[in-house]
Image: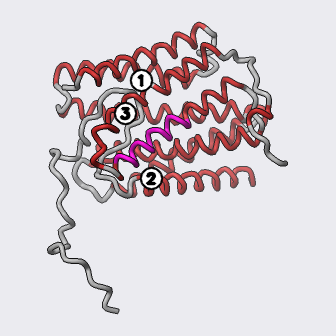
Amino acid sequence: MSRKLVVVFLVMLVLTGAMGLKTAVMAHSDGSLIMANGSSPAPITPYRNGSSPAPITPYRNGSSPAPITPY
Amino acid sequence: MPGPFAYFIWFVGILCEAAVLVCALKKGAFRRYLLLNLYMAGLIVVELGRYKIVSEFGLSSTQYQYFYYYSDAILTVILYFALSSLYSHVFSEMNAERYVKMGTLLLLGGTALFTYAVVQQSTARFVTHFVVDLSQNLYFVGVVLTYVLWGAILKLRETRTRLIQLVLSLGVYFSLLAANYAIRNLYPSLSHYFIPLVGVFGTFLPLAWAYAFWRLPEEARLAPSRLAVIPR
């Protein structure tokens, strides 16, 4: 039983580590993907329509710097 | 359409993948490393399919996009199982195969669940989002698993040269791709240099595996002191 729990713990640890690594690597990503299989040229991401640059976040009006939190 | 350099690298990659199968068959390692060889065979089939679709429909066609990303997800799942088979080899003397299988399935299920939880908010093209994100998440799981396996090899003082070569080359391959991706995003102006490198890196893994099957016999052993000195 304890061995099975160790396996479950390790699985959760690996999953957490992997998703943490993904977040760190993709922090400055432009939305492109890492392709790891073969040497064929990668097409654009299928759910990105066109290659136009992404717009700014819609709830940011203008480019003025954000003030400090009021509270 | 891809340029001549991309075509050249593409065909070199296919040749290297075929070389892995030939070397494994010649040296009698095909069945011993069955999942690794199945991954290479799948890679050859997919690469040829991609070539056919690119030559018929073009690089920016929807057909190529979907074939590329769906086939990539399947290949990533096979690579994940191939990696778990390397775990089985390393832990074979500990009779831990049952636990390796259990962990493999749990981790795959956990990754799929996590991906579903992240992707479920997107209503449009849900399946495509899921497939692409699952492939990406499994890639990072593979990176971590490879590092953990390398740690286990050091700790257990594994001496089988061929096995060490297979694991190390996988680790270097994953690391090269992750580093390339990170640098590309940190310095977008250098993307022109780093994007073609992905294809070049794609030839590294089959080359290293072909070398492992061809030049390193199964009986070859490394002296433990040459690997690392770990205080017990």
Instruction: Please provide percent x and percent y for residue B206.
Output: 49, 22
Residue B127 visible, this angle: no
Q: Neighbour class for label 1 at 10 Å: few (<14), some, many (≥20)?
A: many
| Residue sitting farthest toward the bottom | A71
| Residue sitting farthest toward the top | B26
Marks 1 & 2, CB-CB < 8 Å contact: no
Instruction: Please provide percent x and percent y for residue A55.
Output: 17, 60
> Which stretch did the figure color magenta?
B171-184
Residue under label 2 = A22
At 42% from the left edge and 35% from the top edge, which residue is drawn? A36
At 40% from the left edge and 49% from the top edge, which residue is drawn? B182
SS category of the residue bearing label 2 = helix
Q: Does residue A42 appear to the left or right of B35 in the view shown?
A: left
Q: CA distance from mark 1 to mark 3?
A: 19 Å
Q: Earlier in the sequence, mark 1 or mark 3?
A: 1
Identify the disc placed on residue B43.
1
SS category of the residue bearing label 1 = helix
Specify the quadrant of the image occupied by residue B160: top right
